[in-house]
Image: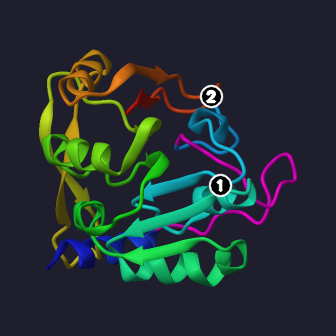
Amino acid sequence: MTEAQAWDTYSKQRPERRPTNAAGENTWFNWTQYPDHGPGAELLGVGPGASVLDLGCGKGGNLAHVATLGARAVGVDVSLAQVKAAESRWRHTGMTLHRTEAIQFLKESGERFDAVFSVFGAAWFTDPTVLLPAIRQRLRPGGVLAFSQRPPIEGCYGCQGSYINRSEDEDPLVVKRWDHEPERWVEILAEHGFTAATARILPAPPGHRKIGTLLVRAHG
């Protein structure tokens, strides 16, 4: 089974984003795995007229919010199911979607971006030694790279296996992910020419499991 088919399977398991959030908003930005929690799109530092790229845009909820801010919102996802879901719900926002791999898009696109982001997306599931140089080629000088994912399991760093469950009669699908501690992410970003890098773990909101969210930000 291909990587695209694995993420198609994942898409079927993920619920649609709620019609509105706790504040009654139709679009919003969520870096974490918990609803109505954590910072928002202000971390990207963009406004009307900016060009923003989402790597692994999924069903498009975060990208749709970026589009409502007046930015040119471009999303990439390898899963046809995810792209179709994003188009079905958010086409009216004017976002542009591409069904392709993140690396392929970055290498073939001639567009430059003011910000690149990934929320539990391609930045987690792509080798950073390949992805980061490709992002820098597409990021305007001083542009922002930001991404979020689950923190690493203690002692399990680098390339790891991540399971996508199927039915009880089928073996789970396996995709690769890259886990590092916050301090190591800062070092990796510096090694690839990024500046002002920060990485921190946002605690889970009260009443939830104790797993927080790793949030990384740097300038190109």
- Three-letter amino acid code of the residue under disc 2: Pro
At x 80% / y 61%, what residue is drawn? 26
Which percent across, then down, holds residue 94? 67, 74
- Three-letter amino acid code of the residue under disc 1: Val
Which percent across, then down, holds residue 37? 66, 36
Which percent across, then down, holds residue 35? 65, 45
Residue count near mark 2 (Cα–Cα under 10 Å), binned few <14, some 14–19, many ≥20: some
Q: Report the span colored magenta.
A: 14-32
The answer to which quarter of the image holds residue 200 is top left
Q: Which residue is mark 1?
A: 66
Does label 2 or label 1 sit earlier along the sequence?
1
Magenta residue check for 207:
no
At x 53% / y 69%, what residue is drawn? 59
Magenta residue check for 31:
yes
Q: Which residue is mark 2?
A: 205
Q: CA distance from mark 2 to mark 1?
A: 24 Å
Q: Nearer the viewer, mark 2 or mark 1?
A: 1
